[in-house]
Image (tube, rainbow, N blue to C red):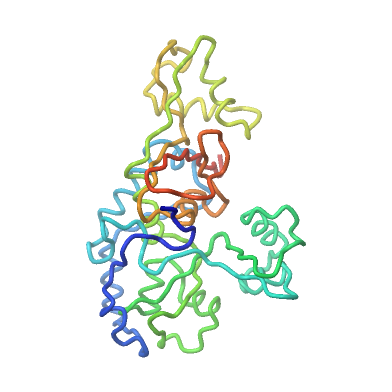
């Protein structure tokens, strides 16, 4: 069974009765309840740019798991790795539209449209940003869609997503912030905070570091160049990460046959409910597909039980 890029195959957390009750009405909750819940939940936010220590090895994994443990069972089912209603923010191209016009419409508060157009083009694998076709579905980096659930308020949504109320109102053209309806689609910045943790916790809970078997002639500097060909110049920070991750007291002393964990490179077995979006969005930071096959080519379809290689990008290193 193939797993859709956009539709997770795990069961919904809420029953049909819960989601249908009051569907035509507004969802409300007191500000005191929202504030109390926000104080009770410890949120770990993976800001950009990320430090090498947050990307490599166990530090980010531990942070994600710690934050997940702080969430209540009512907020996150252990069998799920995303909040109900979360999915990619997409746009289907209509006749006469241009990528620039689409980007301006979806990022109304951002003035750096030239850079955003390039980013959206790269995110969608467009070779020519001036060439899009009618019916084509485009996804947006650093944005995701959220479907309002029973019991939601804008304050609650803002709290778990780390969006401001003002941004949610502006980005979605909401006239009355006190009136939202079940099933309404909202576009949010992120994912950050609890939303980020919910997306990434399953990956960090079962991913394994890719291991390299040392052969004659290997050095940590050579391995740094081998596994990070996109970097040039001084790769000492990657050598340091190799040494730290493998508890090497002397980075210059490795032996033939030794198994070394490769920083930033993981293997992961696809599970029911995984989608390209739910894995790529938190792991890539909105910079595209980090899932690779055994030949290093981008993975475009997922099947439960499939093993993929994950090459995490480095920010601010």
Q: Compared to 303, does 277 lie above or below?
A: below
**In-image side of 132 versus 214 (left or right):** right
Residue under the point 64% across and 65% down = 136
Provide residue 188's location: percent of width, then percent of height.
49, 69
Provide residue 255's location: percent of width, then percent of height.
43, 11
Q: Compared to 157, does 261 lie above or below?
A: above
Provide residue 207's location: percent of width, then percent of height.
37, 40
Q: Residue furthest left?
A: 73
Residue under the point 41% across and 42% down = 306
Residue under the point 63% across and 68% down = 110
Q: Quadrant of residue 234?
A: top right
Q: Nearer the viewer, residue 203 or 94?
A: 94
Q: Nearer the viewer, residue 34 or 306?
A: 306
Q: Quadrant of residue 184?
A: bottom left
Provide residue 246's location: percent of width, then percent of height.
39, 24
Count of marks overlaid on the render: 0
Quarter the C terminus occupies: top right
Q: Quadrant of residue 198?
A: bottom left
Residue under the point 40% across and 36% down = 57
**In-image side of 181 versus 97 (left or right):** left
Q: Residue furthest front?
A: 1
């Amino acid at each position: 069974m193939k797993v859709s890029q956009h539709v997770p195959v795990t069961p919904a957390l809420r029953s049909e009765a819960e989601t249908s009750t009051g569907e035509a009405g507004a969802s409300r909750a007191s500000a005191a309840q929202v504030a109390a819940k926000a104080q009770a939940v410890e949120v770990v936010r993976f800001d950009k740019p990320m430090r090498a220590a947050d990307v490599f090895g166990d530090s980010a994994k531990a942070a994600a798991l710690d934050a997940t443990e702080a969430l209540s069972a009512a907020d996150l089912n252990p069998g799920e790795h995303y909040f109900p209603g979360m999915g990619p923010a997409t746009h289907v191209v209509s006749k006469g539209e241009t990528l620039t016009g689409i980007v301006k419409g979806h990022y109304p508060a951002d003035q750096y449209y030239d850079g955003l157009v390039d980013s959206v083009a790269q995110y969608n694998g467009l070779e020519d940003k001036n060439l899009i076709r009618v019916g084509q579905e485009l996804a947006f980096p650093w944005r995701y869609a959220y479907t309002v659930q029973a019991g939601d308020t804008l304050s609650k949504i803002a709290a778990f997503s780390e969006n401001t109320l003002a941004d949610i109102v502006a980005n979605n053209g909401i006239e009355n912030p006190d009136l939202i309806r079940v099933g309404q689609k909202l576009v949010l910045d992120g994912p950050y905070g609890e939303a980020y943790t919910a997306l990434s916790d399953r990956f960090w809970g079962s991913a394994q570091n890719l291991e390299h078997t040392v052969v004659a002639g290997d050095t940590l500097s050579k391995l740094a160049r081998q596994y990070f060909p996109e970097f040039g110049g001084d790769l000492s920070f990657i050598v340091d990460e190799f040494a730290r991750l493998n508890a090497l007291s002397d980075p210059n002393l490795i032996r033939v046959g030794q198994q070394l964990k490769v920083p930033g490179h993981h293997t992961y077995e696809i599970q029911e409910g995984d989608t390209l979006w739910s894995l790529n969005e938190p792991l890539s930071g909105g910079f595209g597909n980090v899932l690779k096959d055994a030949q290093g080519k981008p993975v475009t379809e997922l099947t439960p039980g499939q093993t993929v290689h994950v090459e995490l990008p480095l920010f601010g290193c």
